[in-house]
Amino acid sequence: MRCALRDDLRGLLGGAPTDAGLLGLVDALCASDRPESIIVWKRSSKVQELLRGLGDGTIPVSHEGLDSVPGKQAEHLRALLQHHGLLPQRDPYLPRFEQWIHAKLDGLPDEVRQPVQHFATWHHLRRIRAKAAAGASTRGPVHSAKQEITETVKFLVWLHETYQRTAATCTQQDIDEWLATGPTTRTAIRTFFVVAKKARINTAVTVQHRAAKTSPSLSQDQRLAWIHELLTGTSESLPYRVAGMLLLLYAQPLVKVVTFPTSIIDDSDTGMSIVLGQQPTDVPEPFASHLREHLASRPNLRTGAGPGSRWLFPSTLAGRHLHPNTVMDRLRDLGVNLLGARNRAIGELVLECPPSLVAEALGYSARVAYLHADKAAEPWARYAGRSVKSP
């Protein structure tokens, strides 16, 4: 089967390819644990068109070449080429953000487009490029930037159409009216006006920080019920139940959970532990058994990526972990209040241990842990003081 697959791939690529990237791609695809899945995949007309383009040179074997044919097929090949060292690693969010900015500005009146373009490129894009160059994740910054740019566009379009004013001639009354007559997401325009003030585009208006009025939290009974469901129920597949348990037991945000490598887990004769912060934390039964089972049967490993993925939650794209939205959506559809679950989990943990120890064990800052301790009406600072004075 592998020989037939190799011949088919070479045929689509125009015979015997000489490009090192294409030769490596053929080897990677043929090395799949499930060559039959590659045979099914290459039957797609879009995949065949892409492979022929790579073979005849109309699509260069490069990031820029794959950017010219956007789609799932190109992203799958890009991931394979990166995973096997045939293309350099590239931040997946930055180029999409650049394309998004271009599309967002298209068709806007000049009075709106010019200040938004300055804000998007000189403030957000420059900062995100620096993060990508340093090897930091840009998913969160790109998400926040998109929200701020989108809300700024909405405001400036409204301002232009309603009062024929611009970012430079906007008044405090305009700001107050906009914020008072819509959802709280409108406060995301604040960053734009901070930047506008520094650039002396408009120094007359101020947008205050928005403080959340409530902090959602499950009851402890609800948290325990979800723990029981994820440990014993069949409402979800094992990987998503494991991810949910890391949220409910250890207050780990799912954007962080999906980035965990398998190396943070140590399973020995004395029990299982997991490193979430500065020190290992015990993994109790029966969750340890679930985690052990998941490690032995992680999905998405039998593709051209090979079995060597380092991620606890591998993606269908070679060499990558699951996208956090994939896990979030699955658990939300199940009915889990994600923020409420995390708040309750850390709230319960700081009732059982000093917040500083919880922070060290779970990878939180001490400030966050103490804030949760205060909300839980357990001021550990006073407790520590009484302990020192006691004989």
Image (cartoon, rainbow, N blue to C red):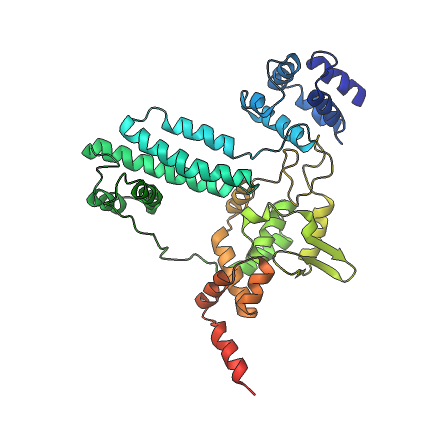
* Tag count: 0
Percent from the top left, x then y, of residue 143? Answer: 46, 40
Percent from the top left, x then y, of residue 161? Answer: 22, 31
Residue pictured at 22% horizontal, 39% vertical? 170
Rendered view: 118 above or below 66? below
Rendered view: 195 above or below 16? below
Give residue 147's quadrant in the image. Answer: top left
Residue pictured at 64% horizontal, 14% vertical? 52
Percent from the top left, x then y, of residue 214? Answer: 38, 57
Give residue 19's quadrant in the image. Answer: top right
Residue 245 lies left or right of residue 103; in this view the side is: right
Can residue 337 be seen here? The reply is: no
Percent from the top left, x then y, of residue 357? Answer: 58, 66
Residue pictured at 76% horizontal, 19% vertical? 6
* Image quadrant where one finds the C terminus: bottom right
Extreme residue toward the bottom, this view = 391
Can residue 15 be seen here? The reply is: yes
Rendered view: 325 above or below 276? above
Residue pictured at 55% horizontal, 66% vertical? 356
Foreground residue among 287 and 193:
193
* Image quadrant where one finds the N terminus: top right
Residue 83 lies left or right of residue 208; in this view the side is: right
Rendered view: 131 above or below 58? below
